[in-house]
Image: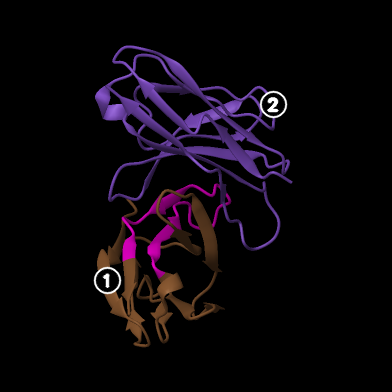
Chain colours: A brown, B purple
Amino acid sequence: ELKVEQNPLFLSMQEGKNYTIYCNYSTTSDRLYWYRQDPGKSLESLFVLLSNGAVKQEGRLMASLDTKARLSTPHITAAVHDLSATYFCAVDSNYGGSQGNLIFGKGTKLSVKP
Amino acid sequence: NAGVTQTPKFRILKIGQSMTLQCTQDMNHNYMYWYRQDPGMGLKLIYYSVGAGITDKGEVPNGYNVSRSTTEDFPLRLELAAPSQTSVYFCASRRTSGGARNEQFFGPGTRLTVL
């Protein structure tokens, strides 16, 4: 059974500093997605990581994928207030297929303080 | 394109009542999904559909039913509401195939409270 774990669940950040959050998953998959959710809002797609070594950047967020370690690690450079949100990692549960059923982690809630 | 739309945005039900959550997408996506999100948790898949007339259970289907008579619409039915069904419900859709991204697009959600 595919499980997705995110760490930490909460992260209080100071403006201007750098941070890393983590998503690891338990079985082989070839697709990993990052979504952002603002309070009371829907999920917005940030990154789709499709292969080992893939790196994608969205503003101050840069995410990579290591399929051998089953790990994705978004790095936050010089945190700013508008990064405050909950970030979900999701993994395609059908390796090599096109079903598209996603297994979500519990999310990492980021809060940026001045 | 409006994308994925959901109605209602909010609803309060009494235990034992029934209701249908509506979901419509105008992107001609064949794949559609229903999720629930409980506080502090990720999303759990309730049901999904790979095309009109085809539906299947997800991780947490008990207490729910779905139908898919058209490509655009994927309603979720709660027959006998229970407090455990208090949650935020998201509908999502995805292109059938082709391209590399394969991402799901989400609707704005329906916040349901069962008292």
Up-down: is B69 above or below B42? above
Residue B1 seen in render: yes
Task: Read off the magenta span.
Answer: A84-109
B100 vs B1, left or right, is left
**Quadrant of the image occupied by residue B62:** top left
The chain carrying label 1 is A
B52 vs A16, left or right, is right
The circle drawn on residue A11 is 1
Element at badge 1?
strand
B77 vs B107, left or right, is left
Q: Position of residue B115 (x, y in %)?
A: 27, 21
The circle drawn on residue A91 is none
Q: Nearer the viewer, mark 2 or mark 1?
A: 1
Up-down: is A57 above or below B51? below
Closer to the camera, A80 or B20? A80
User: Which amino acid type is shown beneath numbered disc 1?
Assistant: Leu
Q: Position of residue A91 (x, y in %)?
A: 44, 58
Q: CA distance from mark 2 to mark 1?
A: 43 Å
Up-down: is A73 above or below A101? below
Q: Is residue A39 magenta?
A: no
Q: Is residue A107 magenta?
A: yes
**Quadrant of the image occupied by residue A105:** bottom left
Residue pictured at 73% horizontal, 41% vertical: B28
Q: Tag count in the figure?
A: 2
- Residue farthest along the front direction in this orientation: A114
The chain carrying label 2 is B
Give neighbour class at mark 2: few <14, some 14-19, many 20+ (Cα, 10 Å): few
The circle drawn on residue B70 is 2
Residue pictured at 68% horizontal, 42% vertical: B29
User: Which amino acid type is shown beneath numbered disc 2?
Assistant: Thr
